[in-house]
Image (spheres, grey):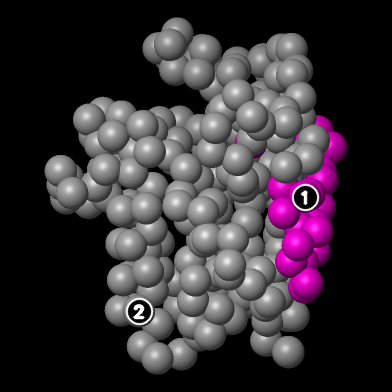
């Protein structure tokens, strides 16, 4: 994201460290996705300062961002979802099989075999750049997470349904990976059909980290989204 905004100056960025993950305080009050969404909404009110904000989320973060935009459309100028979780229940997701790909030469050499296996389970483009991203930006978050909080959230992973709400009407971008075996792309396409200003992209040779595996193309799509929001 910072490489993207280097060519789009003037935007203030706030990166969210959700409860139970990283350095945010742990709390027994966080019992599911609804409780985390309440925190996201409170943070949106706090940091937006009365002006509409943009929301960008990946995976479960995109699930929360979409819900926040639906609940507070006047506070959200634009919504971008990268490889979004749209169906909370694992057994109900429409996902492709994970491709059997070989690690690039040297990738994972000397690393913990369990970390390498976790990378293999998610990577579609298992090259050095993706491995470095996984090692520097994914593994620290997994290791810092509070297992008890994660378990509580997973027990109540689905957000409370609010079918009476109108779809988010603002400029929206949904980017998916065709080989994403975690959340897939077909469920996100069904969501895109309900959003009146949605650009929807399915990127081949990309999985759950499509924004890393196809960074140049995703950056172009995000740049277009920023222009749409600005207009």
- Indicate which disc residue 223 carries: none
203 above or below 231? Answer: above
SS of the residue under disc 1: helix
Q: In the image, 144: left or right of 6?
A: left
Q: Position of residue 182 (x, y in %)?
A: 62, 30
Residue at image point 45% right, 52% down: 160
**Disc 2 target residue:** 45
State yes or no: residue 22 in magenta: no
- The residue range painted magenta reads 188-208
Mark 1 highlights which residue? 190
Give residue 147's position: percent from left, percent from top: 26, 28
Q: Nearer the viewer, residue 2 or 60?
A: 60
Q: Position of residue 162 (x, y in %)?
A: 52, 60
> Relative to 14, does residue 85 appear above or below in the rendering?
above
Q: Secondary structure at mark 2?
A: helix
How many numbered circles does the render carry?
Answer: 2
Q: Position of residue 141 (x, y in %)?
A: 36, 38
| In the foreground, 19 or 191 | 191
The alpha-carbon separation of the residues under discs 2 and 1 comes to 29 Å
Q: Quadrant of the N terminus?
A: bottom right
């Amino acid at each position: 994201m910072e490489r993207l905004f280097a060519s789009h100056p003037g935007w203030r960025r706030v990166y969210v460290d959700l409860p139970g993950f990283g350095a945010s305080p742990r709390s027994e009050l966080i019992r599911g996705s609804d409780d985390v969404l309440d925190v996201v909404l409170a943070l949106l009110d706090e940091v937006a300062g009365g002006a509409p904000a943009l929301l960008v989320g990946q995976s479960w973060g995109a699930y929360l961002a979409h819900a926040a935009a639906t609940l507070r459309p006047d506070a959200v100028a634009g919504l971008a979802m990268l490889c979004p979780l749209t169906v909370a229940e694992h057994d109900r997701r429409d996902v492709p099989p994970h491709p059997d790909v070989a690690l690039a030469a040297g990738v994972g050499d000397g690393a913990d075999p369990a970390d390498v296996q976790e990378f293999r389970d998610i990577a579609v483009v298992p090259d050095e750049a993706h491995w470095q991203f996984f090692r520097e930006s994914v593994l620290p978050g997994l290791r810092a997470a509070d297992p008890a909080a994660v378990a509580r959230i997973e027990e109540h992973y689905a957000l409370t349904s609010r079918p009476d709400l109108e779809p988010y009407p603002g400029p929206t971008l949904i980017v998916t990976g065709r080989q994403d075996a975690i959340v897939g792309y077909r469920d996100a396409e069904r969501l895109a059909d309900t959003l009146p200003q949605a650009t929807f992209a399915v990127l081949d040779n990309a999985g759950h980290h499509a924004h890393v595996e196809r960074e140049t193309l995703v950056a172009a799509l995000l740049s277009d989204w920023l222009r749409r929001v600005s207009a």
